[in-house]
Image: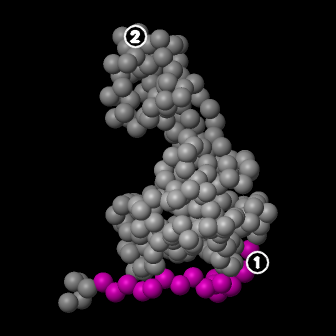
Amino acid sequence: MGDEVRVLHRLRIEEGDTGLGDPMAPNVGVVVDVETTGLSATDDVIIELAMRRFRWDDAGRITNVGRRWCWLEDPARPISDEIAKLTGLNDGMLAGQEIDEGAARRILSSATVCIAHNASFDRRRVEARLELEGLPWACSCAEIPWRDFGFDGRSLGYLLVQSGFYNGAHRASDDVDSTIALLAQEVAPGRTALAEMVERSFADTWIVRAKGAAFELKDALKARGYRWDGDRKVWWLEVADRTPEEWWLAGNVYAMSANPKALGPEWVRISNRERWLN
């Protein structure tokens, strides 16, 4: 039965030294997760905010883990049955609750990098709620090539199971701990998932906007990975290496035969202080 049975252990992230490296290592990560009343960035609001600090060394090893921080917040309207089932929260639990804005701001502002498993979702909502901007962010979902290391999928719970653990209900603090556990995983000899993510997060990338691309090229742009920006009315893509994309655009979008309505694309250099805002 050995190959037919997988043993999963209940995840427990203990506070304090991990026994790996210097517990006062200089790098500080803050993992963040939110639960909200829905998916809209403009109409829905945060009902739970959780975060936890940790220190890591230059080898990418987590050396010390801080305490759990978690706040509920009253959305001033009933939450839906769907959100109640998903989060385990209800109107009674949220009534009169409020995020400690000062504490949350201090914790986030102390970070070398703020981390979320879906940073494009969490960053905008957290920074808007706490009136913060310009913090460095990383995404443990998108900035770690999980498939290259033998994992299937990128959802938090599924990655955790493949690492040999399970966690509790879908609450923000549990998701924070799950993310820390995944970051600590050794995905290659002497190489942690955290090291992979940090390397990518702190490398600048480029946002390219295919201004003036002919409508007929939408399928080719989608196949290339471009996404439609409804506000700017333009197809865009984030790339790590500018040169190959310049060649592809020159041959496929801005060649005379492609009937472009602009001379070329728009390029914007992006650091982790601007990333995950789209």
From the top left corner, tell me how far across and down residue 123 is, in percent.
Answer: 61, 52
Question: Where is residue 233 drawn, in percent x and y?
Answer: 50, 24
Can residue 147 be seen here? The reply is: yes
The overriding secondary structure of the stretch rendered in magenta is loop
| 240 to the left or right of 109 | left
Q: Which of pointers 1 and 2 lies earlier in the amino acid sequence?
A: 1
Q: Is residue 257 above or below residue 96?
A: above
Q: Position of residue 189 (x, y in %)?
A: 48, 73
Q: Is residue 82 above or below residue 40?
A: below
Residue at 26% in and 85% down: 5
- Residue behind mark 2: 259
Distance from Cα at disc 1 to Cα at disc 2: 58 Å
Task: Look at 42% across and 79% down and name the residue there.
Answer: 166
Q: Is residue 111 left or right of residue 193?
A: right
Who's the residue at 40% across and 38% down the image?
225
Is residue 7 within the magenta segment?
A: yes
Pointer 1 and pointer 2: residues touching (CB < 8 Å)? Answer: no
Q: Which residue is mark 1?
A: 24
Asked whether 141 or 87 is in front, the reply is 87
Q: Which quadrant is the C terminus positioned in?
A: top right
Q: Secondary structure at mark 2?
A: loop
Above or below — where is 143 with respect to 67? Answer: above
Query: x%, y% of residue 135?
Result: 71, 52
Magenta segment boundaries in residue numbering = 6-25
Residue type at mark 2: give it. Answer: Asn
- Residue 266: image quadrant is top right
